[in-house]
Image (cartoon, rainbow, N blue to C red):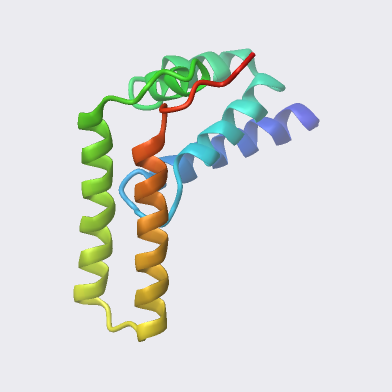
Amino acid sequence: MKKYLFISLGVFFVILGAIGIPLPVLPTTPFLLLATYFFVRSSPKMYDWLLNNKVFGQYLINFYENRPIPIREKLISIGFLWLGLGSTFYFASLQTWLILLLIFIGICVTIHISTLGMWKRKN
């Protein structure tokens, strides 16, 4: 029973991670890390699928090995973040406090993406 619950949770978090790729306010990394957590404890087959997946696999491997993310990928990610936020500001009529909150979140995510891979973990 626990195995199937963990597999279901892993699939759920992969789906959330996939949705988070184009959406700037939904983080991808934590959901994919949760998916690997549940898959490694329930299904070696699903864990291998995730690590060998052409969309998520190299991203997760680089994260686990603390390899730097190429600048081009960082710039693309930050560009999509601000494109998504900008289109939200343009098409949705938001209250000022919500716009300021989204700008603050955007700045924090931009800083986070910019600094990914800058510091090596000490073993």
Does residue 44 sit above or below 77 in this rendering?
A: above
Does residue 81 sit above or below 34 in this rendering?
A: below
Residue 70, picture quadrant: top left
Residue 2 position within the rendered picture, expressed as x and y whole percent measured from the top left: 79, 31
Instruction: Name the residue: 48% across, 22% down.
Output: 50
Q: Quadrant of the N terminus?
A: top right
Answer left or right for 89 relative to 102: left
Answer left or right for 4 relative to 109: right
Q: Nearer the viewer, residue 122 or 41?
A: 122
Q: Nearer the viewer, residue 3 or 57?
A: 57
Residue 42, picture quadrant: top right
Does residue 48 sit above or below 68 in this rendering?
A: above
Residue 84 position within the rendered picture, expressed as x and y whole percent measured from the top left: 25, 58
Instruction: Name the residue: 53% across, 40% down.
Output: 31
Q: Residue lying furthest right in this view? A: 1
Q: Nearer the viewer, residue 87 or 120?
A: 120
Instruction: Name the residue: 40% across, 78% down.
Output: 98
Residue 33 position within the rendered picture, expressed as x and y whole percent measured from the top left: 56, 32
Q: How many marks?
A: 0
Instruction: Name the residue: 25% across, 32% down.
Output: 73
Residue 12 position within the rendered picture, expressed as x and y whole percent measured from the top left: 56, 41
Q: Quadrant of the C terminus?
A: top right
